[in-house]
Amino acid sequence: MEDTDLSQGWLPLLDHLDRQVSSGRLSPDTATLSDLMSIYQVPGVSIAVGHVSGQVWTAGYGVAAGGTSTPVTAGTAFAACSISKHVAAFGALRLVQDGVLDLDTDVGEYLTSWHLLDLEGRQPGVTVRQLLAHTAGLSDTWYRGYAADNAPSLLQVLEGSGPTTTPPVRSTLLPGSRFRYSGSHYSVLQQLMVDATGAPFDDLMQTLVLEPMAMTDSSFDQGFPHRRPDLVARGHHGGGTGVPGGWRAQPETAAAGMWSTPTDLLRLDLEIARAASANSKLLDRDLATEMWTPQIPGGTYGLGTEVVERVGRRRFGHTGLNVGYTCFSYVWPDSGFAVAAMTNSEDGWELLVSIRAAADRRYATTITAAPLGDVTGRYLLHDDYPIDIAVTNGQLTFSAPAQQPVALLAGPDGHYQHPGLDLEVWFPQANDQPRTLELRQEGVTQIATPATRQPD
């Protein structure tokens, strides 16, 4: 295990964070975490790094609220934003494991307090799996929260009634046909879990997830921050302006309403990693593997989990953005390390991606370059966009439609750079599957699959 002293490994990293992270390699444009906090006017940041062995390092930077001297500590709770979905999914899968829910059963079998309809008032065929994977095609919604004294109930959110500021939750796309990220999927999941068990959602999550994993600084109860105001980070808009009241209430708790710390979030991701290796008492291996298996071919989302699945670059977890807060929690399963970071600012994402990039460089395993002859052939980016890879004078050449062939520049870890474009390519292979060609341009990765015939 590397990083025998996590603080010695991470303190230098936080003094040299890369501000140009799209390439995945350290650039000369670096800044300290404190500098980035000042540039983006982020009052507070909390970070935790851990390993499946149980080793954990934590650090707090800045203050819990702008204009105060209350420091951020390991016990300071932040809004976990959409990481709430990740935790809620773990709870739902524990109900699947107990036989209370079935992943592929229609949600209508469980919902009794409210019924999911399409725009014409008909009941669509939607499964629990599709809710977890954001493939049910429900209303495109982002939840901005409410003042504590004007928050609707979850049923009002689903119905679009009372003080609710979002439209009614409806089926608007063909279920199962595509991925569309939306908090509405987890609002339906929340009501479904309540109806199926008869328990309030925050109590249910306490029993299924938080207590068994000793996540003592976490809660889905919207009264949680009011009971410990000195241990809660206040949210801030861009530019450092405080959120009125300190934070917003989120009746859509499964989608965006959890309060937590980076240390607690690590416990979840490391437990999923253990479960995927059949070393968890809470979740079996098959269900844990489902969590970080893309549910749409070529997709990047499993069951409540964001997935980066490239050979030697695997990580899973979740990111989050609420009014006043940003955060991420990821585990690199091949190395057994996890990193979580939370800020009390909507502008915190710029420094969070730099922290995540540092973790990628430190904990992602190395790709072994494939023999040149193993990667040659035709790949299809789209049906009408073939890419041909050949070997000329001992170098890989890259040919795209209407473009001149070019010799690629070999880089580390089996990656190749186009000499004239912001284009990086590599050739991953998962298990016994054929190699694919992955292209990254401006930080966006696309996958080209092998053609059925070789180029003429």
Image (cartoon, rainbow, N blue to C red):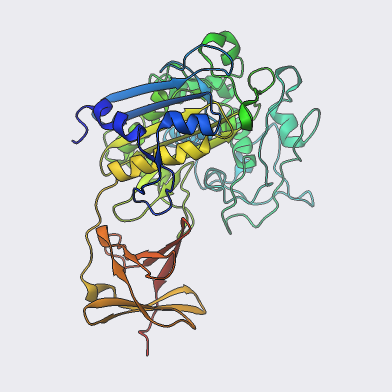
Q: Is residue 314 above or below residue 249?
A: below
Q: Is residue 54 visible?
A: no
Which residue lies at the image location 75% right of the left edge and 30% below the top edge? 156
Q: Nearer the viewer, residue 77 or 414?
A: 414
Left or right? Give the position of 306 relative to 339.
Answer: right
- Picture coordinates of residue 406 (x, y %)? 36, 78
Q: Is residue 312 above or below residue 433?
A: above
- Residue 205 seen by the camera: yes
From what the image shows, is residue 330 above or below residue 206? below
Give the answer, above or below, for where 260 lies relative to 351: above
x and y, in percent, of residue 38 in the image? 51, 29
Nearest the camera: 68 or 270? 68
Q: Where does the N terminus fall, quadrant-wise?
A: top left
Work out which quarter of the rendered image holds the C terminus and state it. Answer: bottom left
Q: Quadrant of residue 412?
A: bottom left
Measured from the top left, where is residue 436 in percent x and y? Answer: 36, 67
Name which residue lies at 34% across and 48% down: 26
Taking the spot 35% from the left edge, 55% from the top edge, the residue there is 310
Say which quarter of the image contains residue 283.
Answer: top left
Nearer to me, 102 or 343: 343
Image coordinates of residue 272 in percent, x first then y, are: 36, 36
Q: Which residue is at the far bottom?
A: 456
Please tell me how many numbered marks the rendered image carries.
Answer: 0
